[in-house]
Image (cartoon, rainbow, N blue to C red):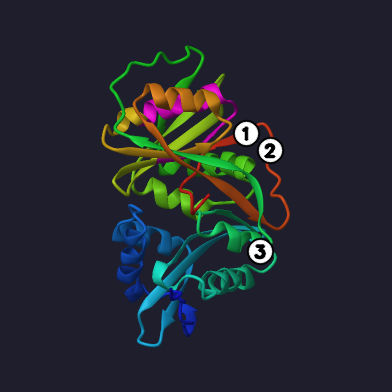
């Protein structure tokens, strides 16, 4: 009985160009990911990309990374065509962004096919993220009387960025500004002080909620409940695996837990303000 041996593939790593994005969409579609061309454009607008191509010019791998100031960043959209895995393409793509990021701490959510490569290159697990999605049910949620919710828009950006930095540990002005150009969000105030916010934008099969930042989980849940009323279409949200109260609410709202994945970091921990916490990622790629 003969063995099916994968033939070694010669490939080249180069900077991603706008004309490469249609091929990138096809790669993510082949993985069953919901990314549209518009989603690739959004992620590329904010970050830097690299691709792997073979001799005939076909693109067989991608990766993007996003700089959040001089000390932090995020990496994602690492995809390698399944027909060419085992040739070191993923490792070379990750090494390219590590070199470009320099001393920055990098965060990444690992896919099943990518976790071994990330682990080999020094990334370490710091937590788990859960992917919830579905069409929300029209349920009534009683909002706390001591909490005031109002619209978040471009005028709210400085305050949002401050809370996000306290929770995430790095400045992400361009990311939040870009999300706010697509949709308004929700601010939460208590005794005249800002205690949380949440954003929502079109993506994938419908809408994506995130980031959500709050001083406690009950406030985060109230913010998410309000965001779910903004658009009743298919909605996705990626939350920390230990946010049990929020997860229970999402289940009651008709969303389904479809996957969970490890969150990894390379480099020093990013120290945020412990009085605020992130309860939803902007996306698994963006952090």
- Foreground residue, 272 or 281? 281
Q: State the image coordinates of residue 190 (x, y, percent, origin top left).
A: 54, 21
Q: Is residue 5 visible?
A: yes
Picture coordinates of residue 250, whole percent (x, y): 42, 27
Identify the residue at horizontal 57%, vertical 42% (top origin): 128
In the picture of the structure, the residue carrying the numbered disc 3 is 120
Of residues 175 and 132, the one drawn nearer to the viewer in this rendering? 132
Residue 52 falls within the magenta-colored stretch: no
Vertical comparison of 143 with 260: above or below: above
Is the residue 199 above or below the residue 148 in the image? below
Q: Is residue 92 left or right of residue 252?
A: right
**Label 3, label 2: how far apart the Cα atoms are:** 31 Å
The span shown in magenta is 209-227
Within 10 Å of disc 1 (Cα), the crowding (few <14, some 14-19, many 20+) is many
Where is 262 relative to 192, above or below? Answer: below
Q: Are marks 3 and 1 in contact (CB under 8 Å)?
A: no
What kind of element bears circle 1? loop
| Residue 271 drawn at (x, y percent) | 71, 45
Choose the circle earlier in sequence order: 3 or 2: 3
Residue topped by disc 1: 276
Is 136 left or right of 88, judged from the image as shown? Answer: left
């Amino acid at each position: 009985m003969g063995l099916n041996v994968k033939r070694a593939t010669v490939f080249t790593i180069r900077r991603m160009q706008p004309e490469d994005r249609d091929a990138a969409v096809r790669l993510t579609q082949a993985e069953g990911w919901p990314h549209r061309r518009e989603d690739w454009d959004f992620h590329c607008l904010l970050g830097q990309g690299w691709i792997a191509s073979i001799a005939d010019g076909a693109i067989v791998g991608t990766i993007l990374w996003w700089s959040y100031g001089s000390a932090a960043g995020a990496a994602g959209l690492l995809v390698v065509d399944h027909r060419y895995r085992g040739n070191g393409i993923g490792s070379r793509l990750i090494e390219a962004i590590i070199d470009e990021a320099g001393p920055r701490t990098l965060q990444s959510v690992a896919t099943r096919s990518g976790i071994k490569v990330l682990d080999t290159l020094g990334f370490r697990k710091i937590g788990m993220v859960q992917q919830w999605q579905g069409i929300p049910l029209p349920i009534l949620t009683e909002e706390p009387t001591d909490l005031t919710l109002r619209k978040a828009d471009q005028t709210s950006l400085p305050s949002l960025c401050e809370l996000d930095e306290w929770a995430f540990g790095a400045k992400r002005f361009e990311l939040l500004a870009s999300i706010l150009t697509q949709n308004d969000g929700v601010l939460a105030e208590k005794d005249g002080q800002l205690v949380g916010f949440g954003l929502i934008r079109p993506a994938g099969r419908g809408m994506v909620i995130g980031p959500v930042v709050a001083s406690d989980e009950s406030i985060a849940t109230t913010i998410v409940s309000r965001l779910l009323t903004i658009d009743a279409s298919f909605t996705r949200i990626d939350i920390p695996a230990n946010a049990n109260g929020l997860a229970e609410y999402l289940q009651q709202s008709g969303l389904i837990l479809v996957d969970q994945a490890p969150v990894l970091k390379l480099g020093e921990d990013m120290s945020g303000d412990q009085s605020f916490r992130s309860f939803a990622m902007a996306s698994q790629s963006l952090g």
